Amino acid sequence: MGVAGKVIAILESFAHVPGAAGSRGLTLTEICRRAGLPLATGHRLVGELTGGGLLERAPDGTYRVGIRLWRIAAQTPAAAGLRELALPYMEDLYEVTHENVQLAVLREDRALYIERLRGPRSVPIVTRVGAELPLHATGVGKVLLAFADEVVQDKVMGAGLAAHTRHTIVDPGRLRAELAEVRRQGYAVTREEMTLGSCSVAAPIRDGRCRVVAAISLVARNSTADPRRLAPAVLTAARALSRDVTASWARDA
Amino acid sequence: MGVAGKVIAILESFAHVPGAAGSRGLTLTEICRRAGLPLATGHRLVGELTGGGLLERAPDGTYRVGIRLWRIAAQTPAAAGLRELALPYMEDLYEVTHENVQLAVLREDRALYIERLRGPRSVPIVTRVGAELPLHATGVGKVLLAFADEVVQDKVMGAGLAAHTRHTIVDPGRLRAELAEVRRQGYAVTREEMTLGSCSVAAPIRDGRCRVVAAISLVARNSTADPRRLAPAVLTAARALSRDVTASWARDA
DNA sequence: CGCGTGCCTTCCGTTGAGCGGAAGCGTGCT
DNA sequence: AGCACGCTTCCGCTCAACGGAAGGCACGCG
């Protein structure tokens, strides 16, 4: 493994930092443990990355991702482009419902969240921008999975369906039936399958060739919300956004 | 310059990619030009970064920032933490006004935009998330500059005030008077100083020690909006967010 | 106080990873 | 065909990278 690979490993060590928006940094020892590097090597490279601004060191000695890396990454077309298109529609949904609004894309066998809007009174949810959650237990995940090709579906079923709550669907047969229902009715519903107390409704975002490229969802309090009442709003926003995606990506091609 | 430094230079070459949300990638030749690297060296390292997922190569052969880098950077506390806190307040402002809502922080002598909400009917604005704009010509910039220490102020004045439109304040004396007015009234106004057709109102976000740590603004159509009517809403959101910032950062300390 | 633990920080002889000029390839244009 | 552009590959040379070991610092405990 060369230096570039080691730099990548170091940066990747920050990809899964627990805590509210990564507010807790990582010690040099922890970075090296995660990246699989000897301490002296890690110290050397982390020092360079810090000197270059990609990492920053807090007063408590821990390292965090630096603002310069964030600036670079803000130019990611994969995230920023779709986010840019989706934001007004998400704002509409938020304004109408005041529930959490989320946007996710399929990445390998996980749902990658690329945007999230929430208000002060919204039900607390576990997702953070940049987080990846299981496909089988989340609204957006079910949508992405339902319209994914069979390789992905087989992979998810074959890997075992982890129970996140007692309501999580863990039987592959039952999940397949659920996915068929998603395809039939055009949206997905989850009820406390990912987080107790939360339910969600999600709908697919399509491109000009009707491929599902993302999913948008509302996440609400299970005790007060009726997913079926939220579905029309989600579907409406999804359709409008799909038209925008189609137009925008046709312009880009 | 070692490998890590070269990797940093390569990543930095993506920091200023023109076009809507960086949708246009960079050729290997352009990357090497920007990073100051020989083609073969650049090719080698870009290949590794692409193999590691930090960069991605589009079908047209150009390179873009990859989703994995975006995921890592989404954990940046500098951006994500404040953004997370500010988002509900920005949503409130958007909901009330349906104008562009922006959040920026002072970075050296520029305003760095860390979040932006806009709707379909909002006036088109030039800022992108991750972009840096001049302090003297933007609402958030004036706020950040008004409350910055004198070193920053002197630096900005000394560097010359570029005219972005015919309304831009380019006279240091006049800008200093304007900044004094910002401090006196607690918010800043711009009228077509950055972009013809747009005006903005911005207010400071403060931490528990009353230091200004960010600025929040509305950007509206100059022909239809009255900045002074927008000011109370911006100030109200800024005050509420400041309280939240104070509480959250005290909890973190 | 001494000791142990955790988390660094520094050092430096060795060597193989990194280097990049040059040659070659592919594409598009005139 | 020739040219320009943007790569892509090759390979002998060399110095940047390596990382175990030693040492430093802060903290907690007996």
Image: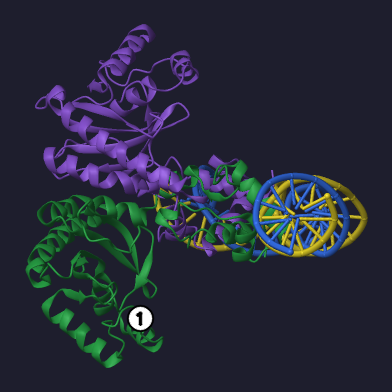
Chain colours: A green, B purple, C yellow, D blue
User: What x and y, as percent, mark residue B225?
Assistant: 11, 27
Identify the image quadrant of residue A128.
bottom left
The residue at which mark 1 appears reads as A152
Q: Nearer the viewer, residue A103 or A57?
A: A57
**Horizontal side of residue B35 vs A116, given as left or right:** right
Quadrant in the picture for the N terminus of chain B: top right
Total count of labels: 1
User: What x and y, as percent, mark residue A237?
Assistant: 13, 60
- Kindly identify the residue that appears in the image at 9 percent across and 72 percent down: A228
User: What x and y, as percent, mark residue B112?
Assistant: 39, 35
Does B197 appear above or below B180?
below
Badge 1: residue crowd in 10 Å (few <14, some 14–19, many ≥20): some
- Kindly identify the residue that appears in the image at 22 percent across and 83 percent down: A179
User: What x and y, as percent, mark residue B184?
Assistant: 28, 15
- Is any part of residue B187 visible from this angle? yes
- Kindly identify the residue that appears in the image at 32 percent across and 83 percent down: A153
Amino acid at dot 1: Val
Secondary-structure class at tag 1: helix
Q: Nearer the viewer, residue A21 or B54?
A: A21
- Is any part of residue B29 visible from this angle? no
Tell which residue pokes out farthest to the top in this image: B173
Does B131 appear above or below A86?
above
Tell which residue pokes out farthest to the bottom in this image: A173
Q: Nearer the viewer, residue B207 or B11?
A: B207
* Chain assignment, label 1: A
- Kindly identify the residue that appears in the image at 36 percent across and 43 percent down: B247
Does D19 appear above or below A248?
below
